[in-house]
Image (spheres, helix red, strand yellow):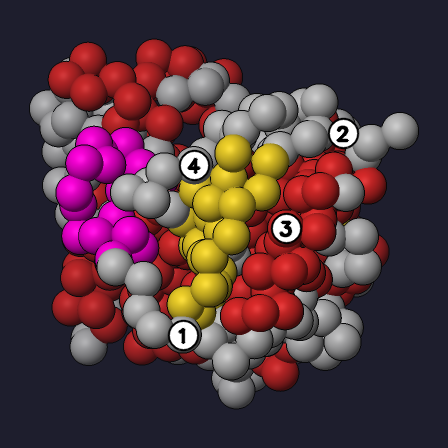
């Protein structure tokens, strides 16, 4: 990892490898959450996608942070089934586009990328806060990251995002799902944490841990 | 060139079935199936959609129809990632899949442009909703049934096809009558229940069976040709008689 605050392409790539480990570690739990209100494949699908990402990073690490994020996007889109592939893929794709011209990501750029990722998810999924989706984790995460970017390090920005995401994910428990397959359950979806919001939280916490440990 | 169609479904069998059905009505257009996940199981595959989009686009654009849920997300993501010039020629339409595929295929076969094919597909849901209502005097029926005007020609034909006016002959009729876009042709059993002959589904929805008497009216500069053609086509059993 570099000495400065900013993240290089190699930093981003190693953080993504760590995300892949975390997602794989939690895949049974994520699928279990999904089984209660969805089709029970969220953890396996996401783990399959990130495993494929790692295989591509093993081949070659792209030159810029943006190119790494784009590789993640295209791989998740093609390997992760259901709605998660397009949603996570679009998130990474928009994040990649938002920082396309930067050789390194400073705290501000990290917040910008997260904000663009949220825009991708809401464009694609049409979900708003309070509908028990990954937006419930990502929206407060972006707000916290943006607030922290003024003075914090990359690690602090990501930790602020992860902490806010965890709170947002917990907030989905009493909510009735309004989007996706869980919405078919109507009121029976109440009382369950949203799997997508949970995986967003794990992902952000993993990124924060990687940034803090470098 | 003609507008192409892409059918995105969670099921490979469903997608190829829709392609088969719509293809019967529109033999000359490209209709691509993008069904099932990468392994052929239930799901949608970004790569299949991407390939289908590229195969269906001959430069005149592509209308994408989908079954449900994440099929839309996969289609939208694929459109976001294609070349921007090609993306401008893609319309994803939210409509009942089977019905929209048939209507859009026929419209494309008739040479309608991208906007028109997309509009026809999008209008299918509206047809269905209207048909669900009693047809004893709703606005559209009034329009259709209105008193014949001066340059309106009318004739009566008889259904000779053993299977009645099913989808294939209905599709043929719609295609043939597209030769006279300036002339409005209405078909029905009852003057109060006439439908426009530019919709396969509306024609099939008449439920015409062998032996039914069919009223044909045409209004416009080519009303004579149109009426003669329709009467002739019924008399010929749409080529289905031995």
Task: Check chain identity for marks 1 and 3: say if they share one.
Answer: yes
Name the chain letter of the residue that bears numbered label 3. B
Mark 4 crowd level (few <14, some 14–19, many ≥20, 10 Å Cα):
some
CA–CA distance in space, label 3 to label 4: 14 Å
Q: Look at the numbered discs 3 and 4 and tell me whether their residues touch, using CB distance below 8 Å.
A: no
Looking at the picture, how far across and down is residue B150, in whole percent?
A: 34, 73
Would you say A117 lies left or right of B13 here? left
Instruction: Where is residue A19? Give x, y as percent.
Output: 52, 43
Crowding at mark 3 (Cα within 10 Å: few <14, some 14-19, many 20+): some
N-terminal-most mark, 2 or 1: 2
Q: Nearer the viewer, mark 4 or mark 1?
A: 1
Label 4 belongs to which residue? B189
User: Farthest residue in the right direction?
Assistant: B242
Q: Which residue is mark 2?
A: B39
Q: For numbered disc 4, what is the local secondary structure?
A: loop
Which badge, 2 or 3, is on the more N-terminal residue?
A: 2
């Amino acid at each position: 990892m570099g000495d400065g605050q900013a993240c290089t392409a190699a930093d981003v790539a190693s953080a993504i490898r760590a995300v892949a480990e975390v997602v794989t570690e939690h895949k049974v739990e994520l699928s279990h959450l999904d089984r209660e209100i969805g089709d029970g494949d969220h953890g396996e699908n996401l783990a399959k996608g990130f495993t494929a990402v790692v295989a591509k990073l093993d081949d070659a690490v792209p030159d810029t942070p943006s190119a790494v994020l784009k590789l993640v996007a295209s791989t998740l889109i093609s390997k992760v089934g259901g709605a998660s592939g397009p949603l996570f893929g679009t998130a990474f794709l928009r994040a990649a586009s938002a920082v396309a011209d930067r050789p390194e990501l400073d705290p501000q750029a990290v917040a910008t990328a997260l904000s663009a990722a949220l825009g991708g998810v809401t464009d694609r999924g049409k979900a708003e806060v309070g509908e028990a989706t990954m937006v419930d984790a990502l929206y407060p995460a972006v707000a916290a990251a943006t607030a922290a970017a003024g003075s914090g390090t990359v690690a602090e920005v990501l930790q602020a995002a992860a902490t806010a995401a965890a709170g947002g994910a917990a907030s989905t428990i009493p909510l009735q799902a309004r989007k996706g397959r869980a919405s078919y359950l109507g009121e029976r979806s109440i009382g369950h944490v949203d799997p997508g919001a949970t995986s967003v939280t794990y992902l952000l916490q993993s990124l924060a841990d990687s940034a803090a440990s470098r | 060139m003609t507008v192409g169609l892409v059918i995105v479904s969670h099921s490979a069998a469903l997608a190829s079935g829709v392609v088969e059905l719509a293809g019967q009505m529109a033999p000359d257009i490209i209709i691509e199936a993008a069904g099932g996940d990468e392994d052929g199981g239930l799901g949608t595959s970004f790569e299949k959609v991407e390939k289908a989009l590229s195969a269906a686009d001959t430069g005149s654009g592509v209308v994408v129809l989908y079954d449900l849920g994440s099929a839309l997300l996969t289609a939208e993501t694929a459109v976001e990632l294609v070349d921007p010039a090609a993306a401008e020629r893609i319309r994803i339409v939210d409509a009942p899949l089977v019905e929209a595929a048939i209507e859009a295929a026929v419209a494309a076969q008739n040479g309608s442009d991208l906007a028109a094919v997309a509009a026809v597909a999008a209008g299918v849901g509206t047809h269905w909703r209207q048909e669900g209502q009693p047809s004893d005097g709703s606005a559209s029926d009034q329009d259709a049934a209105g008193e014949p005007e001066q340059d309106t020609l009318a004739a009566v034909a008889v259904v000779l096809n053993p299977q009645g006016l099913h989808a294939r002959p209905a599709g043929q009729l719609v295609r043939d009558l597209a030769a006279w876009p300036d002339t409005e042709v209405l078909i029905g059993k009852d003057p109060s229940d006439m439908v426009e002959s530019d919709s396969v589904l509306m024609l099939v929805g008449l439920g015409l069976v062998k032996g039914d008497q069919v009223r044909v009216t045409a209004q416009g500069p080519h009303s004579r040709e149109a009426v003669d053609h329709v009467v002739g086509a019924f008399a010929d059993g749409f080529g289905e008689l031995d």
